[in-house]
Image (cartoon, helix red, strand yellow):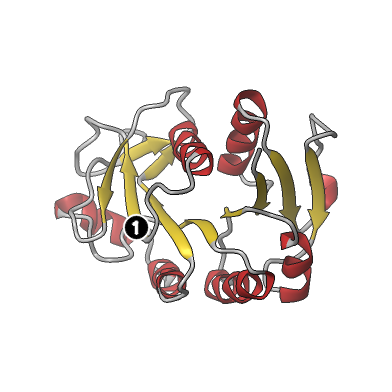
Amino acid sequence: MTKVLILGANGKIAKLAEAQLLAQTDHQLTLFLRHANRLSVSDAARETVVEGDATDQASLEKAMKGQDIVYANLGNHDIEKQAKTVVAAMKAAGLKRLIWISTLGIYDEVPGKYGQWNHQMLDGGYLETYSAAAKVIEASGLDYTLIRPAWLSNKDIVSYETTQKGEPFKGTEVSRKSIADFIVSLINDPTKEIGHSVGVDQPGTDGDKPSFY
């Protein structure tokens, strides 16, 4: 049994990962989010809901006590500040294993017309803030895994392939269900992909943009 702290637990991918963890494992889940009343638990014996802000180090440290793994499903204009606070709180709490959701394009790793389209769609400082947050995680000294999903779909499939930092990104899209499955695989085997930044896409989706655009 592993104790997992999920930051941003009301996110779509987080909810899918939570459901899979409850169905397939005996892990204990602590669900951390800004507004606790937005989330209801399905297994009170294995789930604890904690209200807090991921930029508040004291709240994070309290939630991190006794945990084994932190899975951060965060994201907004505060993402760099959140990264700094999560890292500081983990170090203060003596925690090492971090799974961090980022985005594709933070290394200019998306090739061709799709890369140009991705930059246009994520204009306005989005990539820059996620890139800055990724640098914080990569310099943290923690046992981190960064996940860079392709454009996300709600397709009811689990089908994905991965690329590593320094390799061109593959594919244009991936299902949220696939990303959740990858996260669960890392939680189930915390030794996988330590210190790696992993691109995740659905095989066979190469093109100039995702099929749903």
- Give the x, y percent position of residue 153: 44, 35
Residue 59, picture quadrant: bottom right
Residue at 28% x, 66% y: name it.
107
Quarter of the figure with the C terminus: top left
Work out whether 15 lies above or below 122.
above
Residue at 85% x, 34% y: name it.
44
Does the image show residue 213?
no
Residue 170, picture quadrant: top left
Q: Name the residue under label 1.
A: 196
Work out whether 200 lies above or below 127.
above
Determine whether, in the image, residue 160 is placed left or right of residue 175.
left
The front one of 126 and 65 is: 65
The local secondary structure at tag 1 comes to strand
Residue type at mark 1 is His
Determine whether, in the image, residue 24 is placed left or right of residue 202.
right
Residue at 30% x, 61% y: name it.
119
Q: Residues within 10 Å of mark 1 (few under 14, many from 20)?
A: some
- Give the x, y percent position of residue 164: 26, 53
Residue at 67% x, 75% y: name it.
92
The front one of 177 and 207 is: 177
- Give the x, y percent position of residue 183: 49, 42
Quarter of the figure with the N terminus: top right
- Give the x, y percent position of residue 8: 65, 54
Work out whether 147 lies above or below 63.
above
Determine whether, in the image, residue 62 is placed left or right of residue 150.
right
Extreme-left residue of the structure = 112
